[in-house]
Amino acid sequence: MTTQSQSTRRWWALAVIAAAQFMVIMDTSIIGIALPKMQAELGFTPGNLTWVFNAYVIAFGGLLLLGGRLSDLFGARRVFGAGWLVLAVGSVIAGAAGSVGVELAGRAIQGAGSALIAPSALTLLMMLFGGTPQELTKALAVYGAAAPAGGTAGVFLGGVITEYVSWPWVFYINIPIAVLALIAVPLLMPAAPARKGSIDLAGSVTVTAGLAAAVYAIVQAPEVGWASGQTWGVLAVAAALLAGFVAIQSRRSEPLMRLSIFRAPNLAAANFAQFALAAAWVPMWFFLNLYLQQVLGYSAFPSGAALLPMTTLIMLGMVVLAPKAMQRFGAKPMIVTGLVVLGLGLGIMSLVRPTGNFWVDVLPASLVAAGGMSLAFIPSLGTAISAARPEEGGLASGIVNVSYQVGSALGLAAMTAVAAAFGAGELGDPTALTDGYSAAFLGAGLLALAGAGIAAATLRSPAEDKTPAQV
C-alpha cells in the first residue's frame, strides 16, 4: 500500500470515528421531541419518563472504564466493532419496545454499546494520528466538532422523525449507520494484538455500580430533593462502592485502573478541565433550549435553528481555529482562556429578559460561549489522553469520557436545582422562568470560571513538563 493510500485510509477511518462520536451524542438528544408520544403509547408516568434519558446516561457513564480496559486488553478495533453491534441491538429493542421495562432495557443496552465505542474510538484515533502532533490536533478537532453536530442534529432529526414517520425510528436510525460502521471497521481501522491480562471483575463491578449509583443520585436529586434521605443514601452507597474500588485497585497486580496513572503530569488537571467544561456547557445548552421554547415561544424546529449559529461556530472553531492556536500558544493558555470566555458568555446570557428576543438576548451570548468551548475542548481532551502511556490509551480515553459525563450530570443537576430555587418551577410565568434560567446561566458561568482558575493553577506548561507522548 502506497504512502498516499495509507494516508487516505487514515482520514476515512477518522470519519468513522467522528461518526461514532456524533452518534453517541445524538442518542442523548434525539429522543427529546419523541418523549410525549412515547409516554402516551408505552404508559410512562410523568415521573419515570426521564428514565428514557437516564437509563442511557447511567449505563454509558457506569461502563466507560470497563470499556477502556477491554479496549486495552482485546484491541481497540475489536471493542469498537463490538460496541457498534451492541448499540444496534439496543436500538432494535428500544424501537420495538411495547412496554416501559423493555424500552428502558433497550436504552441501557444502547448506553453499554456507547461505553464500548467512546474509549475505543479515542484509542484508535491516537493509534492513527498520535505519531504526528500537528495531525493529531486536526484529528481531535474533527472528533470534537462531531459532538455539537450530533447534539443539534438530534434535535432536528428527532422532530422530523417523530412528526413525519414514527417515534421508534429515532432508535432505528442507528441501525443502518451501525451496519456501515461494522463494514468499515475491518477495512479502515488499525489492528492491535490482544494483550495478556485479567479483566478484574471485582473492580469492574464495584466501579460500574459506584458510578451508576452516583449518576442515579445526581439525576434524581432535582426531583426528590438534594436534602432527601434518598439522595444522600444513594450517594453514600456510591461513595462506599467507589472506595471499595480504590481499595481493590491498590491491591491487584493487574487492576482495571492503575491508580498511579493520575501521577502522569497533566492527566488529572486535564480531566478536571473536561469536567468543568461539561458542568458549564451542558446546563447552558439545556436551559437555553427551554428559554427559547417556554419564554420566547419557539416551537421545536425554530428552537433547533436558533442553536445552529452556535453549533456552526463551535465546529469551525474546533476544526479551523483550535489547531492553529494550539500550535502557537500551547494547551494550557487555550484551556484557561477558553474556560474564561465560556464563563463570560454565560454571564452575558444570564441577562436574558422575559420579553427578550433571539438577536439581543441569545445570539451574542451564545456565540461568545461557543467560542470559549471551541478554544478549550480540544486542548483539554488531547492533553488528557496523551498524558498516559500508549498501552493505556483505552484507560485514559475511558477516564476522560467519565470526567465529561459526570461533569454533565452533576452540572445539570446542580443548575436545575438553582433554576428551580429562583422560580423556574413556575410554568406559564415567563418572568419566573426567566429568573430561574438566568440564575442557572450565571451559576454555570461561575463553574466555568472556577474551572479556569483551577486549570491555571494545576496545568503544567511544556517548559515545566514532558508528557509520555513527548519523550
Image (cartoon, rainbow, N blue to C red):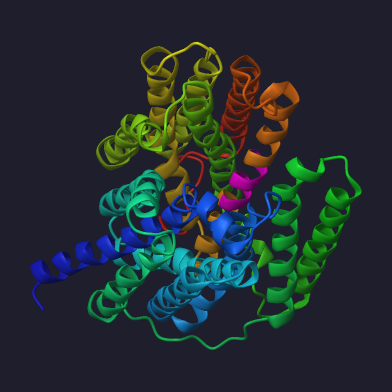
The answer to whether 175 is drawn above or below residue 313 in the figure is: below
The answer to whether 20 is drawn above or below residue 188 in the figure is: above
**What residue is shown at x 30% (from left), y 71% (from top)?**
176
Relative side of 342 to 188, left or right: right
Q: Residue furthest bottom?
A: 196
Q: Residue furthest right?
A: 229
**What residue is shown at x 26% (from left), y 53% (from top)?**
135
**What residue is shown at x 50% (from left), y 61% (from top)?**
397
* Residue 130 in view (yes/no): no
* Residue 104 in view (yes/no): yes
**What residue is shown at x 61% (from left), y 66% (from top)?**
104
Q: Nearer the viewer, residue 69 or 113?
A: 113
Q: Position of residue 117 (x, y in %)?
A: 45, 68
334 in the magenta segment: no
Q: How many marks?
A: 0
Quadrant, the C terminus: bottom left
Relative side of 419 to 367, left or right: right
Relative side of 71 to 421, left or right: left
The answer to whether 441 is drawn above or below residue 258 in the figure is: above
Q: Position of residue 34 (x, y in %)?
A: 47, 52
Most frequent secondary structure within the magenta stretch: helix
Q: Position of residue 336 (x, y in %)?
A: 50, 30
Residue 361 quadrant: top left
Q: Which residues are magenta?
A: 405-411
Q: Position of residue 54 (x, y in %)?
A: 62, 56
Q: Nearer the viewer, residue 99 or 406?
A: 99
Relative side of 149 to 334, left or right: left
